[in-house]
Image (cartoon, rainbow, N blue to C red):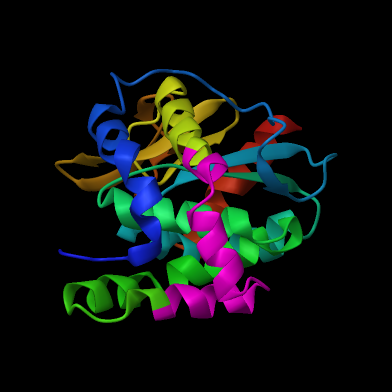
Amino acid sequence: MTMIIRPLASLAFAIGILAASAAPGYSQNPAQAERPDDHAIGSTDAPLTMVEYASFACPHCAHYQIDAWPTVNAEFVETGLVRYIYRPMLTSPPQIAAIGMVLAECAADEEYFDAVDLLFTEQSNIFQTAQDGGDVIAIYDRIAAAVGVSPEQLSACFGDPAMNEMVNADAQQASTDGITGTPTFIIGGKVLSTEPTVDGLIFTWGGAPLLIDGQRVPGQLDGDSFRRIILHFLEMSE
């Protein structure tokens, strides 16, 4: 994919290095404690905390956002059962991942999760427009406008050295946390991810197959699967 995005020259110098050097061997780092710079929603008194590591360049993350997040948000976050922390990270193509990170950060705190949702909703359009050599900036300007950010403000964010530092810091932190792919979650103190097996994709927890009622859980990024997973961990937390 080739893509030319004029305001992003200031982001380019370190992204490729970080994307190539990220992710050592898998680590059992829970990293579940909320950090001062985290973006989080839901009650601080919720019985369960869930952390998501995702990339705006990750199609599976978009799948989760569109098919699972509405259920997670409506049934567990908005009802006070889950405190939800979103941590963006870089994956390939790193330019698209970084653009999304900066745009979402440029929005007001109360608009951050709306920006995340829009970026994933528009992801396939962004990829196709970039592949066709179209006006990708127009898509980002439209997303930004929907969360109260003008084209001028967005351009200023792209040129802000602090945003470059934020992108690099988030990439390094995800690597330090032992996160090697997206989407990856931390729930119940261990890493929840998916892994291919001879029987298909399954969820793993802490590096071992996640078992609910003695059965492996198919690695489907949909609302029904995450309802089942969250209810399982809520029961464990009682």
Residues 92 and 106: in front is: 106
Picture quadrant where residue 132 is located: bottom left
Would residue 161 be counted in the magenta stretch? Answer: yes
Please give the name of the residue rendered at 51% of the width and 53% of the height, measured from the top-left corner.
Answer: 102
Q: Can residue 103 be seen at all in this image of the molecule?
A: yes
Q: In which quarter of the image is the C terminus?
A: top right
Within the magenta stretch, is there residue 234? no
Q: Is the magenta stretch mostly helix, strand or loop?
A: helix
Side of 173 where 199 appears, left or right = left
Name the residue nearer the viewer: 10 or 101. Answer: 10
Q: Where is residue 184 in the image (x, y as percent from the top left)?
A: 43, 40
Question: Which residue is depicted at the point 56% across and 59% down?
Answer: 156
Count the marks: 0
- Magenta region: which residues? 138-164
* Res. 214 in view: no
Q: Quadrant of the N terminus?
A: bottom left
Up-down relation of residue 69 to residue 238 (above or below): below
Q: Left of 24 or right of it: where is 223?
A: right
Name the residue located 39 percent from the left edge and 18 percent from the top edge: 27
Name the spot of residue 62 as percent of width and height, x first. 40, 63
Instruction: Determine whether 214 is above or below 5 in the image.
Output: above
Residue 101, given in percent of the width and then of the height, sits at 49, 52
Give percent across and percent down for residue 185: 49, 39
* Apparent side of residue 28 relative to residue 127 in the rendered image (left or right): right
Name the one closer to the observer, 14 or 118.
Answer: 14
